[in-house]
Image: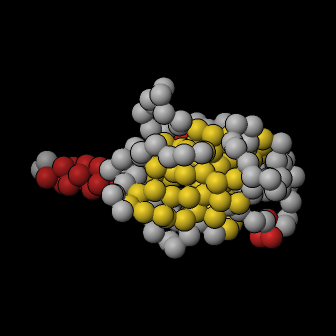
Amino acid sequence: MLRVPLFIAISLAIAFGGGIWSTLVALEATIGFGAIKLGAWEAFPQAQTINADPYAKSHRANAGKLLYGTAEGLTFTAAVDESGARLDGNCTYRMTGHTPPARLWTLFTNDAQGRPPAENAELPAALNSRTVLRGPDGDFTIRISASAQPGNWLAVAPHQSFRLVLTLFDTPTAGSSGLIDLSMPKLEKIGCGDA
């Protein structure tokens, strides 16, 4: 007598639980559609606009992130280097070149879940266009490593993978349709461990 209602309750719990679980997995899997890949860097220019797809809107709402207007900012992330290998805190990387035109840019690291690393006040956790040292033609070289490096250095946590987040503020690039023609800084692995 109680078996039929019990089976119905179990079936409904599995259906609702599976639906909620699959929705959460879909939201964590991607920021949305319309990604633009430039070397190691990836951006979602439509993710912050009115034309964003439902996954992008849900991802933003779930993360509680600040939204930029179309020409206010564009965020690029890199989880791999130029060769396609995942960024690892045990390795040293060199980022060279120029950024696309912007009034200001910032560069910092996140862990694989998108959280900033534990901050150590003595280590450089972020760089920006106003503090980075540049060459005579305006290019820069930034070393990304867990151990101290000469020149521009961005510290990362050892023994874990990370992502680089480069945000361009007040840039004509964000509202441009010519995103594919942009040149982004190159990200090369120059050694791992004691090598």
Task: Please tell me which residue is depicted at 37% across the width and 54% down the height of the picture.
Answer: 90
Residue 111 % position (x, y):
44, 47
Farthest residue to the bottom: give it.
Answer: 83
Task: Count every numbered label the image shows and give the total.
Answer: 0
Of 63 and 113, nearer the camera is: 113
When asked about the image quadrant of residue 18, the answer is bottom left
Identity of the residue drawn at 60% across and 57% down: 95
Residue 13 seen in the current view:
yes
Q: Position of residue 31 (x, y in %)?
A: 58, 55
Which residue appears at 20% of the width and 55% of the height?
7
Residue 164 spot, x, y in % from top left: 55, 51
Residue 132 lies, in percent from the top left, at: 69, 42
Q: Can you say whether 129 is above or below 191 in the image?
A: above
Q: Quadrant of residue 61?
A: top right
Q: Quadrant of the C terminus?
A: bottom left
Q: Is residue 37 above or below residue 113?
A: below
Residues 47 and 176: in front is: 176
Question: Can the viewer see residue 24 in this picture?
Answer: no
Please name whichever residue, 171 or 30, is drawn nearer the observer in this view of the structure. Answer: 171
- The structure's colour scheme is secondary structure
64 relative position to 194: left or right: right
Q: Is 15 placed above or below 73 here?
A: below
- Image side of residue 152 versus residue 131, left or right: left
Residue projecting furthest to the top: 121
Identify the residue at horizontal 63%, vertical 40% (top origin): 127
Left or right of 64? Residue 192 is left
- Seen in the image, is 133 located left or right of residue 1? right
